[in-house]
Amino acid sequence: MHLLEHPAEICGPAIYEQYMKRVSRYGHDVDFTTGFETGRVGDDNRIACLSGACFKLSGAALRRYGFLPDENFLYDEEIRYYERVHRLGGVPVYVPEVTVEHIGSLTIGKRSFNYFYYIFRNRLTYFRSIAGPRYGRYGRFTRLYASWCLDVLYSNLKRRNWEGIRGILCGVRDGLRGVTGPHGRHEAGMRTG
């Protein structure tokens, strides 16, 4: 089956990493009140959030739910999008019989400044603009986010990944400032105003 042939208005495939014989990702369940993952897909293949790397939107889905948001860049744009889809009654579907091979990140390195910058900034801007005002779970989000920051900071300290640490700190700073959209490495890392 080809993904375009599937009847669901929003669906996504199993995504394999290059040279791996197992599914590396396809999406996840998300607590939209915080933006954090809660688990995996259920038995009926309905899922809260498909992977942003590859999914199909029908014309009807685009008219009903709109396009992916401009506010996030590189990471977590699908969480913001699927919060809207679920709020409007949509149901994304995981299609395991359709597969995609993900050759690797061609846009960003896994331990780079930009990787950590966008992950941490976008999660914070999602909460500040969508989840916080809509659901008001500030205490729970603060605990989850702080714990996540400390875990990842500690991991980067052990590896002496100074670019990663700088990316996390700049991402948190800009997330608190409400910075959105794409920014180049230099612009994101050197923002002072």
Image (cartoon, rainbow, N blue to C red):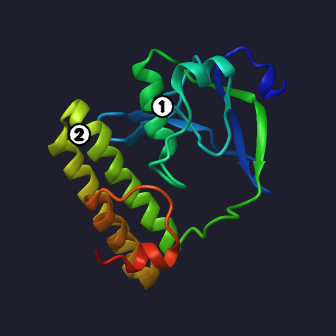
Work out whether residue 41 or residue 58 is closer to the camera in this orientation and state it.
Answer: 58
**Residue tagged 2:** 132
Residue 114: x and y in percent read 50, 69
| Amino acid found under the numbered disc labelled 2 | Gly
Q: Quadrant of residue 5?
A: top right
- For the residues labelled 1 and 2, the Cα–Cα distance comes to 16 Å
Residue at 77% across, 27% down = 3
Q: Quadrant of residue 159?
A: bottom left
Q: Horizontally, is 169 left or right of 107 in the view? A: left
Q: Quadrant of the C terminus?
A: bottom left
Q: Quadrant of residue 146?
A: bottom left
Residue 131: x and y in percent read 29, 37
Residue at 48% across, 35% down = 81
**Residue tagged 1:** 82
Q: Secondary structure at mark 2?
A: helix
Q: Residues within 10 Å of mark 2 (few under 14, many from 20)?
A: many
Residue 145: x and y in percent read 28, 54
Q: Horizontally, is 172 left or right of 185 in the view? A: left
Residue at 78% across, 31% down = 98
Asked if residue 156 can be seen in this view, the reply is no
Q: Secondary structure at mark 1?
A: helix
Which of the two labelled residues, at mark 1 and mark 2, occupies the earlier sequence position? 1
Asked if residue 40 can be seen in this view, the reply is yes
| Amino acid found under the numbered disc labelled 1 | Tyr
